[in-house]
Amino acid sequence: MINTIPLAEFPQGHLLTDFITKEKITLSDHLWIAGGFVRKCLFGEQRWCDVDIFGPRFSTLRSLLSNQGYALEYKKYNVTYTKGNDVIQGINLYYPTIQACLESFDFTICQFGFDGTNIYTGPTTIRDYADRLLVINKITKPLSTLRRLKKYRQQGFQMDLRSILKINKSVMSMHSNEVIADYMSGGTSFSYF
């Protein structure tokens, strides 16, 4: 179950509205921001990181950012827009709703979304963030989750035993061709802990 919280309940919430106003991005039930950028804005952490924008329709976003001087780079799962140090990623995975998007995220601390009006979180997202605890929500790409685990551990997050066991089970159940393909694409160095 995904929680809906009015933006006004977060004192730093203005950082999100400042960003979408500056970039002239109109969010809706068809286009939303999710992940680390939302979390960092809400809790006043380092202001800038890449911005992940999700939604079933990207043509409006593409034309808007192109007209503002962003360079476009098409990748397998996203379109990356860059201008100086600013990076906005349009994620090319189809999620019909912000709730479905957040339910697909691997760690609960990533389950932050913003649709221009409300904040959406997983049931334990805010508590897990406050406790600096990495808890698995869903694993779809085990090696990607391992890479992200390393990144979050460097940011001071710790993982609970149940989540460690889930990752271990997921990686151990992978076929060798999946591991080799990931390694050959530059995906992993096998040094996570």
Image (spheres, rainbow, N blue to C red):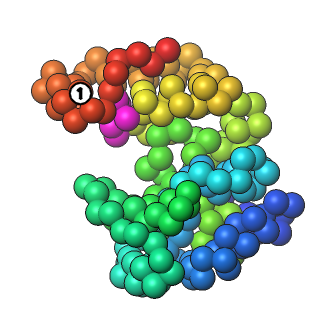
Q: Which residue is mark 1?
A: 183
Q: Position of residue 70 (x, y in %)?
A: 46, 72
- Residue at image position (47%, 46%) is 105
Q: Position of residue 67 (x, y in %)?
A: 45, 85
Quadrant in the rendering for residue 1: bottom right
Q: Position of residue 58 (x, y in %)?
A: 38, 76
On screen, residue 10 versus residue 4, left or right, reads: right
Is 153 in front, or is 29? 153
Is 113 in front, or is 180? 180
**Is residue 92 shown to the viewer in this render?**
no
Q: Position of residue 37 (x, y in %)?
A: 62, 54
Q: Which segment did they paint magenta?
A: 140-144
- Residue at image position (47%, 77%) is 69
- Residue at image position (49%, 19%) is 164
Residue type at mark 1?
Answer: Tyr
* Mark 1 element type: helix
Above or below 115: residue 63? below
In the image, is residue 57 part of the stretch drawn in magenta? no
